[in-house]
Amino acid sequence: MLAAGCRADCNGCTHRALSAPASEAQKAAWLARALSPWRDVLAPIRGVRGAARLGYRERVTLTAQWAAGEAHGEWRIGLVRRDEVIDIRDCPVHSRRVRQSLAALLRVLPSAAHFPLAFYVQAGAQITLVLKTATPPDGAWLDAVTVQALRRAGVEGLWLQLYPCAGRRLFHKNGWRLLWGQPHSEDAAGMRYGPSAFQQLIPVLYGQSVDAAQAFLAPHAQARVVDLYCGSGRTLRRWQQAGARVLGVEIGAEAVACAAHNAPAAVVLRGPCAQRLPQVRDWVAATADGERLLYVNPPRTGLEAEVSAWVCAEYRPQRMAYLSCSAGTLARDLRRLCAAGYGVERLLPYDFFPQTRHVECLALLRREV
């Protein structure tokens, strides 16, 4: 049975008609198949129940499409299906802040002829309107009533991203304009983030995953922690607070700046992890001897081949925690690591995306040889 507000023609949440136990059972079966060599150390999925399975999505990227009507047109905002945008502004998976923000803006946004909106992006309290143009539009539409509505919704910054090629990529390094508010916000943990921030959903589950990684890695004052794909620095701060010497690598300029603020004692390098290996090697060589620890949270493609080779042949951490959003690439990387002398002690799955087929898994590995 669909939750109230779900559209029958939206295929965004493939498990939305399943109960929590049924959805988690399907995910557990998939993990058991994909990670079959390590099935004996695969824990039950940790998820949330009841109302917590709805209203959790604070990070959204939605396509915009102008629908012209006989009297006047309107914006549709949502997911593309057969070249048509299915409007999901009232999706029950969106947080209250996202739903209220959409309602406030869609009442006043100009038509596509004057405002070529391509995407609506919201990261918590920061909103970005991505326009397929390099020319700034007239901003008279943003009135005081709308600003007050955004404030009530919990919005703190409203941006334009002027990008004529929007679609091939979401953002460009240029073309950012702050229409109203402040350029950064802080989440419930006091972590600074900006408009293009990646955010793990279901904070209570993400917190559990970080707790589990910290308990296993056990960073301390004599340890070195390399944190690859470190985002805005939530985990960097954890290792830093435990007294370890910390280095992080992240590709996004905004995330790197936020990570440097959130974990000021850490060294943070900007760029693809594979391209920053020379600097990582220099840092490892320059730091004093001590336990080598590794935390990685890569994209769906998993560890780059060069990174995997460096971990297995050069850095060789005593312990490693690997948070994965793809069981397929996790299995590939675990096979490489196990062949290099690592043992998988525990696989901890987390249901960060209720109502969907996606599941994340934290792998805890120890060097055996």
Image (tube, rainbow, N blue to C red):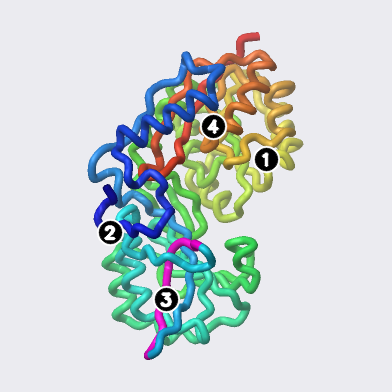
Kindly report the distance in space between the C-alpha atoms of the residues bearing marks 4 and 3: 37 Å
The residue identified by callout 4 is: 327
Question: Which residue is label 2 attached to?
Answer: 5
Dot 3 or dot 2, earlier in sequence: 2
- Crowding around mark 4 (Cα neighbors within 10 Å: few <14, some 14 to 19, many 20+) is many
Residue flagged by tag 1: what amino acid is it? Cys
Q: Can the viewer see residue 220?
A: no
Give the Cα distance between marks 3 and 2. Answer: 19 Å
Say whether disc 4 or disc 3 marks the residue closer to the N-terminus: 3
Q: Nearer the viewer, mark 4 or mark 2?
A: 2
Stretch of the chain drawn in magenta: 71-81
Which tag, 1 or 2, sits closer to the chain's start? 2
| Disc 4 from disc 2: Cα separation | 31 Å
Q: Quadrant of residue 70?
A: bottom left
Which of discs 3 and 2 lies nearer the camera? The answer is 2
Mark 1 to mark 2: distance in Å? Answer: 41 Å
Give the mark nearer the N terminus: 4 vs 2: 2
Callout 3 secondary element: strand
Where does the image place residue 159, in percent across and percent down from the top left?
A: 48, 70
Residue occupying the far bottom of the picture: 71
Furthest residue in direction top, as rendered: 369
The kind of residue on which mark 3 rests is Trp
Compared with residue 20, is residue 122 higher up or lower down, i.e. above or below? below
* Residue at figure coordinates x 66%, y 13% from the top left: 341
In this figure, which residue is indicated by the disc labeled 1? 273
Kindly identify which residue carries mark 3.
75
